[in-house]
Image: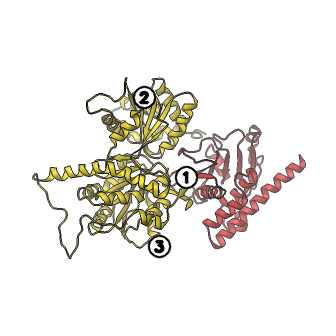
Chain colours: A yellow, B red
Amino acid sequence: MLRQIEGSRAVAEAVAMCRPQVICAYPITPQTHIVEALGTLVKKGELNAAFMNVESEFAAMSAVIGASAAGARAYTATASQGLLYMSEAVYNAAGLGLPVVMTVANRAIGAPINIWNDHSDAMSQRDAGWIQLYAETNQEAADLHVQAFRIAEELSNPVMVCMDGFLLTHASERVDLPGQEQVDGFLPPYEPRQVLDPNDPVSIGAMVGPEAFTEVRFLAAERMRQALDLIPAVAASFAREFGRPSGGLVRPYRVEDAELIVVALGSVLGTIQDAVDELRADGIRAGALGITTFRPFPAEAVREALGGVHRLRRLVVVERALAPGSGGIVTADLRAALATTDGRPPHPGDTIISTVIAGLGGRAVTRKALRAMLTSAAQGDLPPFSFLDLRRDLVESELARMRAARRSGPSAENMLRDLSATAPGALD
Amino acid sequence: MFQVRFHGRGGQGVVTAAELLASAAFREDRYAQAFPSFGSERMGAPVTSFCRIDDKPIRTHEPVTDPDALLIQDPTLLHQADVFVGLKPDGCVLLNSARSFDELGLADFAAEHDGGWLRTLPASSLAMAHLGRPLPGAPMLGGLAALTGVVGLDAVLAAIAERFTGTVAAGNAAAARAAFEFVAGELARERANA
């Protein structure tokens, strides 16, 4: 049914239609509205699930691990510091091969404390063994949860659905929410591969030494390899059942004859598509490639999406997270994907790859800034690594302070003081 | 695309007003997007929210920087922030006040902005009269409907009925309707005098 609905609410209703039996969560902005709405549905009796209030995110993930091992369909949601706090258990869920589904309402990681959106939180867990799906719109966020339970349970591997905090979670958009019968038809009841059953006792979570640990990890890699086939198959099945494309591995936009392609994850893709249209109107052959599945990284699908692009000269990776001392996290995977097995680049000529760090801690990524940056990329003026809309004056002042005095003080506070001194009206 | 920026204070229903406008547009089979300015929520602190309305799907997720309409729910914000920044030359401003732009010391701004619509609307008074609480969101939307026609009054009323229940729904609906009639009446008088 078509609704004008807040993203968090749409996700809560989609999750509820997946009939989770145990929901366990600890509130943290900007995830809170999702679990609040689920709690309300449970309390009103519209969702038959155990809603467990816990004392922390570590407890939330530990409890869903227990619930999942006991054969229940289990769900949780978190963000930012909450995801870090549960990190040890995040790895355990994957290591044990338990098909938990978790929403991450993407938010920056402190310090400095920041409640706004970027991808630092989910990126920090990219090698925890979870499948990671990134939603472009609230429609896709809702749809991805329905697909996530099916993918997770078929593989017996946890799935993280990442949606941009505030930008999606707190935005009211048009969402076509599926009916309960449709979801029931798409998502069969959970049939666990392993289960704690008093009538057929097993132990789960043994200590494994050097004799088999590598083999357990090999199987984790193998599940991810299988996921690369399963995720597009589930997306295709979803498109047939629900009549709209959602999910999958990658999403190309106007790449066919593109000489400049922007690669990104999440809600910024919509703004990028608008910018691409503007660049096309300017005569620049631009395109975009959305990475919907970031883990496993769909190297072959990326190569295919870019492979037909014989004129491609430039790739610009817009990243909502920073790997200090390394650069762009997505860029590293993209470079690896584009290095073919024989070591040669897949395209004739040189493909120049630039990383642009954008939208950190809630900094708006505007079409205007994207258009200017991409225009300079098309002209060959974009450096290999840069920050979009960086306030260089703030950085320069702080660097000057640090050069001038040993005890220059805390940088974040210094820059905030500079900002308030230059704010309009501050000197009135 | 029609873009609206709402300015108000925490507790005034600034975010709810943007969501109601999006819901009203949705009822008229249009695409809409509403979102808050993502600050730390506190009662009384300046709050901004946004709404986009279009005939085709809205892909962008950037803040509204060049609004077609500004709905300013608290006139004291005029002294704190540049609420008019980015307003399109032919854009409209609806300001919650029982006083005129001249009386508020905004005659210069009004003179510079002769391409658009500038209105004050006693939205808080209308809300007090009909709802019993000074929550200007619903009457501001009624005023916007009369001023621009970007959504119809019926759609605004339907959005209110979906969001609220009982006396709160009835009070907000009555305040929105009164505001619509207030602005429509002023416009009719001005046309008659022109």
The residue wearing badge 2 is A312
Badge 3 density bin: few <14, some 14–19, many ≥20, Cα 10 Å: few
Q: Which mark is residue B36?
A: 1
A41 vs B9: above or below: below
Mark 3: amino acid: Glu
Instruction: Give the residue at x 51% y 28%.
Output: A375
Q: Residues within 10 Å of mark 2 (few under 14, many from 20)?
A: many
Mark 1–mark 3 Cα distance, whole angstroms, equals 29 Å
Specify few, some or many for label 1: CA neighbours under 10 Å numbering under 14, 14-19, or 20 or more: many
Q: Amino acid under label 2?
A: Leu
Q: From the viewer's perspective, is A273 left or right of A293?
A: right
Tell me the mark number nearer the camera, choosing from 1 and 3. Answer: 3
Q: Nearer the viewer, residue B63 or A394?
A: B63
Q: Quadrant of residue A36?
A: bottom left
Q: What number is the disc on residue A46?
A: 3
Q: Is residue B94 left or right of residue A371?
A: right
Q: CA distance from mark 2 to mark 3?
A: 52 Å
Measured from the top left, where is residue B171 in percent x and y?
69, 68
Q: Are marks 1 and 3 on the same chain?
A: no
Give the amino acid at mark 1. Pro
Q: Which residue lies at the image location 34% right of the left edge and 30% below the top edge?
A: A346
The answer to whether residue B9 is left or right of residue A397 is right
